[in-house]
């Protein structure tokens, strides 16, 4: 089926149920994470800039959750790993001054390699929450927070972000810049270490259509 025909069919099905002005929205972000501190257990490691990205799909069909996929690579001189997360979530609040999302999903720490060559991976379940509060006299600027809390059979961890987001509404798309502090930590039994962690500043550029 051609793309235009498929989108038209979706619109016809969803229109009677839609409660929002738009049928759907796709938001994508990409940026850098620059850890000022990386540790393996109690041992400090060195790390360069790390690339992170996510994409989310939101729609106006009641009861069906929205979806997002997050990914990041962490490279250091003591360990390397990739983290990928898939999340189903709801928008509990979507106001001009306040937004609040929450959901559940799965996180997979993969392609993990220690300095001695030992490889590891770790599947985990997670809960997710994200909130933004706009400044009263400057609504384009908001305080932003994002949280993943993860737990699995052989691993557990978290990924927290807090900072500021500047949003600019353009005719064809919306643009955002988000920056602040990020802290990630994983306890992975397969790696035979106490904790793998990284914390520092992040900066993302986002586009919504």
Image (tube, helix red, strand yellow):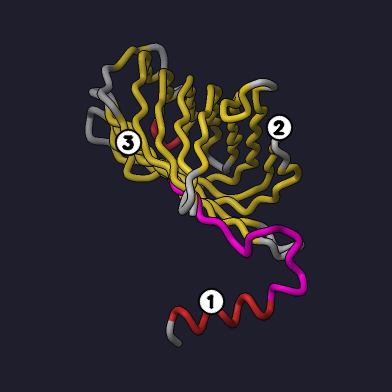
Question: Residue 96, image x and y in percent?
Answer: 70, 37
Which region is colored magenta? 14-28
Confirm whether the magenta stretch covers residue 23. Answer: yes
Q: Determine the secondary structure under disc 3.
A: strand
Residue 18 appearing in the image = yes
Q: Return the residue at label 2.
A: 97
User: In front: 102, or 115?
Assistant: 102
**Location of residue 56 in the rendering, given as x and y in whole percent from the top left corner:** 52, 52
The first of marks 1 and 2 along the sequence is 1
Instruction: Write the residue at 76% across / 74% down.
Output: 16
Q: Which secondary structure dominates the residues rendered in magenta? A: loop
Residue 208 appears left or right of 139:
left
Place residue 120 in its image quadrant.
Answer: top left
Q: Which residue is mark 3?
A: 51
Q: Is residue 24 above or below residue 174?
A: below
Question: From what the image shows, is residue 43 above or below residue 12?
Answer: above
Q: Which residue is pictured at 46% across the width and 53% down the height?
A: 172
Q: Which residue is mark 1?
A: 7
The part of the image, by quadrant, that contains residue 145 is: top right
Please give the name of the residue rendered at 61% of the width and 43% of the height, measured from the top-left corner. 126
Inspect this view and state whether residue 69 appears.
no
Q: Is residue 185 left or right of residue 50?
A: right
Say which label, 3 or 1, has the lower sequence index: 1
Label 2 SS: loop
Q: Is residue 88 left or right of residue 2?
A: right
């Amino acid at each position: 089926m051609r793309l235009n025909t498929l989108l038209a069919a979706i619109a016809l099905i969803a229109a009677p149920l839609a409660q929002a002005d738009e049928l759907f929205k796709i938001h994508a972000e990409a940026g850098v994470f620059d850890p000022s501190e990386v540790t393996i257990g109690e041992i400090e490691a060195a790390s360069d800039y790390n690339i992170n990205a996510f994409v989310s799909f939101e729609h106006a069909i009641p009861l069906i959750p929205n979806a997002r996929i997050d990914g990041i690579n962490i490279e250091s001189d003591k360990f390397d790993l990739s983290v990928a997360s898939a999340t189903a979530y709801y928008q509990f609040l979507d106001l001009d001054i306040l937004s609040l999302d929450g959901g559940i999903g799965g996180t997979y720490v993969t392609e993990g390699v220690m300095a001695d060559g030992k490889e590891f991976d770790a599947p985990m379940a997670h809960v997710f929450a994200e909130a933004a509060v706009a400044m009263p006299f400057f609504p384009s600027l908001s305080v932003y927070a994002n949280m993943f809390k993860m737990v699995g059979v052989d691993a557990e961890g978290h990924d927290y972000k807090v900072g500021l987001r500047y949003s600019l509404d353009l005719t064809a798309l919306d643009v955002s810049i988000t920056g602040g502090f990020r802290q990630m930590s994983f306890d992975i039994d397969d790696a035979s270490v106490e904790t793998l962690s990284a914390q520092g500043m992040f900066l993302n550029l986002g586009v919504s259509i």
